[in-house]
Amino acid sequence: MLNQGDKAWPETTQIHFVVGESSPGADSSMVVKVGHVDPGEALDVWTGDLEVRSSGLVHFFYR
């Protein structure tokens, strides 16, 4: 994830699972704490294991 803006994200920043293909533990109540991120800073966000379909593609949307 990359903060492409010109302001830092606050310590309370979270991402919320919106919709996607079924995966263990992924549902509309899933929230992942991101925390403070400075402008231009990139970080890895772990949202759990993925269950890859036979097509090899997995789509998830977060907000």
Image: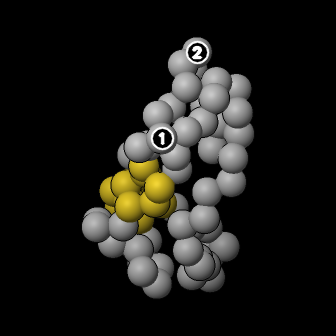
Query: How many marks overall?
Result: 2
Colour option used: secondary structure
When asked about the image quadrant of residue 58, the answer is bottom right
- Horizontal side of 16 relative to 43 (left or right) equals left
In this rendering, is residue 3 above or below 12? above
Residue lying at the far top of the rendered structure: 6
Expressed as whole percent of the image width and height from the top left, the position of residue 52 reads 61, 79
In this rendering, is residue 17 above or below 37? below
Nearest to the observer: residue 9 or residue 45: 9
The amino acid at mark 1 is Glu
Q: Is residue 50 visible?
A: yes
Disc 2, SS:
loop
Q: Residue at x 43, y 51 (%)?
A: 15
Disc 1, SS:
loop
Q: What whole-number distance in Å separates the C-alpha atoms at marks 2 and 1? A: 16 Å
Residue tagged 1: 11
Q: Circles 2 and 1: CB distance less than 8 Å?
A: no
Q: Residue at x 69, y 47 (%)?
A: 43
Q: Is residue 4 visible?
A: no
In this rendering, is residue 61 above or below 38? below
Q: Residue at x 29, y 66 (%)?
A: 28
Q: Residue at x 58, y 15 (%)?
A: 6
Which of the numbered marks, if any, corresponds to residue 6? 2
Earlier sequence position, callout 2 versus callout 1: 2
Expressed as whole percent of the image width and height from the top left, the position of residue 51 reads 57, 81
Which of the numbered marks, if any, corresponds to residue 48? none
The amino acid at mark 2 is Asp
Q: Residues within 10 Å of mark 1 (few under 14, many from 20)?
A: few
